Image (cartoon, rainbow, N blue to C red):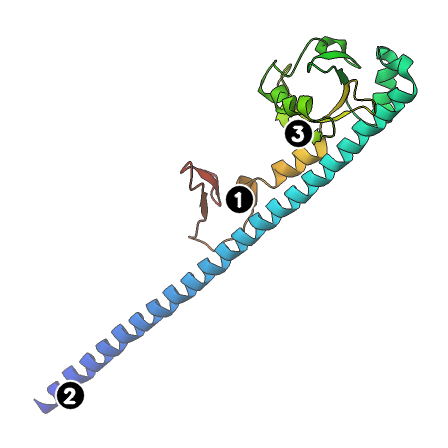
Amino acid sequence: MRKRKILILSITIVAVALILETCILKYVNDKNAQTTSNVLLDRVIAVIDKNESSESEFVKSLKDDYIVRAKAISYIVDAKPEVEYDVDELQKIAGLMFVDEIHFIDDTGTIYSGSLPKYFGYSFDSGEQMAFFKQMLNNYDLTLCQDVTPNTAEAKEMMYAITWNESKTHMVQVGITPKRLLKELKQNQISNVVADMPVYKGMEIFVVNTTTKKIEGATNRT
């Protein structure tokens, strides 16, 4: 009888020990999983923030560069006024300045000349993209460069920079297809960044836009 009690007690002690061990292991695993999740989430946030910062700096650099090109073309045409209406010469200048389009815009906001005749007649009233530059009409010292935006005529992704010429008789606008920028923006999209994040088996990361409530990226694209 005594041996039986000792056996039952031993089994009970072993069972309790196993339960305690299981609980401890579960606690430790849960704690490790939580720590790992926090580390991965911090990494995702850090990478996204860094990408957004680098994108912002790169876009600012491009805008400054495009404004300089617009001013340079304005200076060239002021020095050689005979090319103002010469499409062939303007196309050559566009090539030399590494821009895709040159437009001359009068004080009403209407394109009257440039390297692409198909755009003649478009104005700041032709659409939302061009309306962005309306503020130029009231400020002769202003220079602007637009973010990457679908243009009014063909809805293709472009960046436009604009400045008044030296004598303030017309505006000079350049249009550039920012291929490198678009490539970098695509690579830095949240969906691509998150999809490439290494995670442990059974773990998934989702990035949700708090405004739209839509999932913008996930480690599991399916």
Give residue 107's quadrant in the image. top right
Direction left: furthest residue? 1
Residue in the foreground of this view, choosing between 28 and 10: 28
Question: Label 1, on which residue?
Answer: 195
**Mark 2 burial class by Cα count in 10 Å: few <14, some 14-19, many 20+:** few
**Mark 3 burial class by Cα count in 10 Å: few <14, some 14-19, many 20+:** some
Question: Label 2, on which residue?
Answer: 6
Residue in the foreground of this view, choosing between 191 and 72: 72
Q: Number of numbered discs present?
A: 3
Give residue 180's quadrant in the image. top right
Q: Residue 151 carries which label?
A: none
Q: How far across and down, in percent of the image, does residue 101 sit? A: 76, 20
Secondary structure of the residue carrying numbered label 3: loop
Secondary structure of the residue carrying numbered label 1: helix
Q: Which residue is rendered at x = 56% and y = 41% of the image?
A: 192
Horizontal side, residue 194 vs residue 51: left or right: left
Give residue 25's quadrant in the image. bottom left
Q: How far across and down, in percent of the image, does residue 32 sit? A: 42, 66
Horizontal side, residue 106 vs residue 3: left or right: right
Viewer-side label of 3, 1: 3
Q: Which residue is rendered at x = 89% and y = 15% of the image?
A: 81
Q: Which residue is rendered at x = 77% and y = 13% of the image?
A: 116
Q: How far is mark 2 from mark 3, CA to CA?
A: 85 Å
Question: Label 3, on which residue?
Answer: 146
Q: How far is mark 3 from mark 1, CA to CA?
A: 30 Å
Q: How far across and down, in percent of the image, does residue 141 sit? A: 74, 30
In terms of sequence position, does the residue under pointer 2 or pointer 3 come before the other? 2
- Amino acid bearing label 1: Ala
Q: Which residue is rendered at x = 65% and y = 23% of the image?
A: 133
- Amino acid bearing label 3: Gln
Horizontal side, residue 10 vs residue 66: left or right: left
Secondary structure of the residue carrying numbered label 2: helix
